[in-house]
Amino acid sequence: MNIKKDWSLWLAGISQAFILYLIWNHHLIIGSEAGNFFYPYIKYQRRLDLGIALIALTIFFIYISKIEAFIKSSSERKELLLVLLTYFIGLALECWIRSRYPFSLAAVIQDKTATGFYTAALQSSFSHILQEFSEFASQFPSAHVQANMPGKTLFFKILQMLLNFPSLIGFFIIAISNLTAIIIFYICKELFRDKLIAWSALLLCLFIPAKIQFQPILNTVSPVLIYMSFFLIILSTKKRMKLYSLIAGITLFFQFLFDPVPFGLGLIFLAILFRLCTGNNFKIKFCNIILFVTLGFCGAGILFYALTGFNLVDGFIYCLKDASHFNASMRPYSIWVIENLKEYVIGAGIASSTILLCSIFKLHKMNWKLPAEGNAGIILAFFVLTILILNFSGANRGEVTRLWIFLTPMQALLTAFFCKYNYGKNGFLNPLGASYLQASISINSIGFVLVS
């Protein structure tokens, strides 16, 4: 398809330019004043040199054009080296964008309002965090510590043992969060059998605006384990079913301990698992994988309880009650039903969101016909369903730029597929460049993470 003649790609570019204009001039409210939460514009900004940002983007695009041919024909070993090289280049660019934010990584990490986990981990022992979780959570003023499972505090506790400096901890968190992009690369390879789609998904995943805006907040790390478990479940349909399913279950346990919200992706996982289970006994295979995943999850939970005394169910109920009380007292449901969607669409990248919405429209016109080997139709349908369920359930009222970061890698995967399907191999450069610029400008303008 000729890119220049495709109306949806032009619409994505125009939409992105319009939103960037509004952000640049401080005219766009992300959140809702009536709903008791919005992200304020930064009063004291660090100077953003758009010239340097554009030069860096141009050099990065040249690098992409040179690497694409190698990716398509490379061996698995060379492919891994290219993926890692791109990961580190993306990490460097992301750190440069993050450096335009007026609050340093160390300041955000140590602040009791922005996160609170660093202070809580510093002042508590492993046994106190796990064996007396409700008492531990309630003693700290941070709403984040009170509303989250202990996994995030434990994560900080481990990082404090390994790294002495908060700035290093912040950098390490950014590096860990970007591992999601590598996992998405291999998920795409398995689902679509197309290295170029996988390559473009990797790049899009590195520059998701919401993720960059909230570094080094731990919501950016939450997608790593959930997508790793998805990848293991996909592998279990092809080889070593019991082993991969058990490991997937164990991974899901630690995901739940860290952040249960990404379990909202479960419908997509189940739908893809059902599709990938082929053969005469596909129902038995599907049930066996579910069984071994459950065994892995429960086994890890029982062992963890025996070793630490932490009851996963009680901890989850405590966090659920805290979140429900907060929503009921602070956030009116009706306002956020609309505002959540607006906030998510912007945070995931306006160009990417526009392309996805246009792809849904095009599929409707084409009677929902897609390449049979793609699996994209199923992922798209359940992705939309997942967003609607999350939104109308009222579980999250506001702050979904941060809380729904776990959805954005799946959107990057879908955007990569539809860019290749609708616009050809270079179609993804539009949303990639747009997301890069959106992250650069918005992080220099809007106070997504404020330090007290």
Image (cartoon, rainbow, N blue to C red):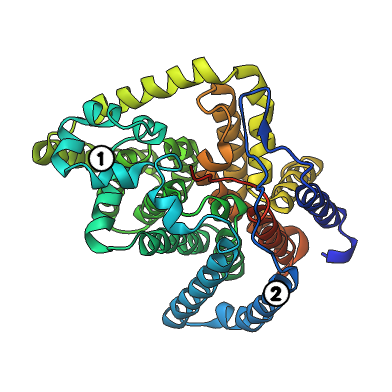
Please give the residue where the numbered disc 2 appears in the rendered image.
Answer: 52
Q: Is residue 47 left or right of residue 181?
A: right
Q: In terms of image quadrants, where is residue 391?
A: top right
Residue 127 in view of the camera: yes
Q: Name which residue lies at 66% across and 56% down.
A: 45
Please give the residue where the numbered disc 1 appears in the rendered image.
Answer: 297
Q: In terms of image quadrants, where is residue 132?
A: top left
Check the image and report above or below for 326 versus 306.
Answer: above
How many labels, in total? 2
Q: Residues within 10 Å of mark 2 (few under 14, many from 20)?
A: few
- Residue kind at label 1, given as amino acid type: Phe
Task: Please tell me the numbered disc located at residue 145.
Answer: none
As rendered, which of 168 and 81 lies closer to the eye? 168
Q: Name which residue lies at 58% across and 31% down.
A: 398
Quarter that holds the N terminus:
bottom right
**CA separation in Å, label 2 and label 1:** 48 Å
